Image (cartoon, grey):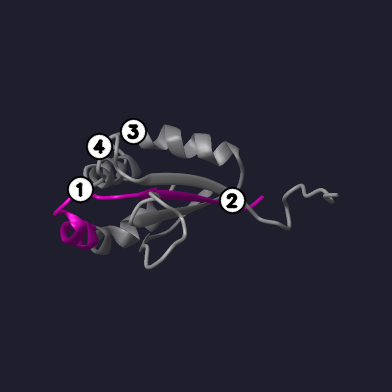
């Protein structure tokens, strides 16, 4: 299978440049430390969108199977692993306010999705 997980988020006010610097410094580590079955695609700044309140940045991760979502979640719990350490550093930049904009989507390749004729 082929899935794209999309996380939309804001960073804490005043931390935008520090966040960009952190991502730049850790981009290769983020790719290399991805758990088996998952691939870090990248973190993107939103240039424009029709979505309201979905965050100013997007994290994209490709997964092979639904089970890889659980594998990634379990890997993130290991604070001693590179993936766990980077995840914790990343989360420190995210605006935790309950009013902060955010979004989350799981997209499945149309080639592999079950699609029925409508109407």
Residue range in magenta is 1-22
Question: Residue 36: in sight, yes or no?
Answer: no
Q: Give the residue number, with chain letter if any, for mark 1.
A: 12
**Picture quarter containing residue 46?**
bottom left
Given contact means CB atoms under 8 Å apart, are the residues at marks 4 and 1 in contact? no
Q: Give the residue number, with chain letter if any, for mark 3.
A: 78
Of the residues under marks 4 and 2, which one precedes in the sequence?
4
Task: Name the residue furthest left.
Answer: 14
Q: Select label 4 or label 3 by which is in front.
A: 4
Query: Residue at position x 29%, y 38% from top?
Result: 99
Could you tell me residue 3's position as x and y percent?
59, 51
Query: Residue at position x 27%, y 42% from top?
Result: 91
Residue 97's tag is: 4
Left or right of residue 81, residue 39 in this image: right
Question: Residue 63: in sight, yes or no?
Answer: yes
Instruction: State how far apart marks 1 and 3 are (Cα).
Output: 25 Å
């Amino acid at each position: 299978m082929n899935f794209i997980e999309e996380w939309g988020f804001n960073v804490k006010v005043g931390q935008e440049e520090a966040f960009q610097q952190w991502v730049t410094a850790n981009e290769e580590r983020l790719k290399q430390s991805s758990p088996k079955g998952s691939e870090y695609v990248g973190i993107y700044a939103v240039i424009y969108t029709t979505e309201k309140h979905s965050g100013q940045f997007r994290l994209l991760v490709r997964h092979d199977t639904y089970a890889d979502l659980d594998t990634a979640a379990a890997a993130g719990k290991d604070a001693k692993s590179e993936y766990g350490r980077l995840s914790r550093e990343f989360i420190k930049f995210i605006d935790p306010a309950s009013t902060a904009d955010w979004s989350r989507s799981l997209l499945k390749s149309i080639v592999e999705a079950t699609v029925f004729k409508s109407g």
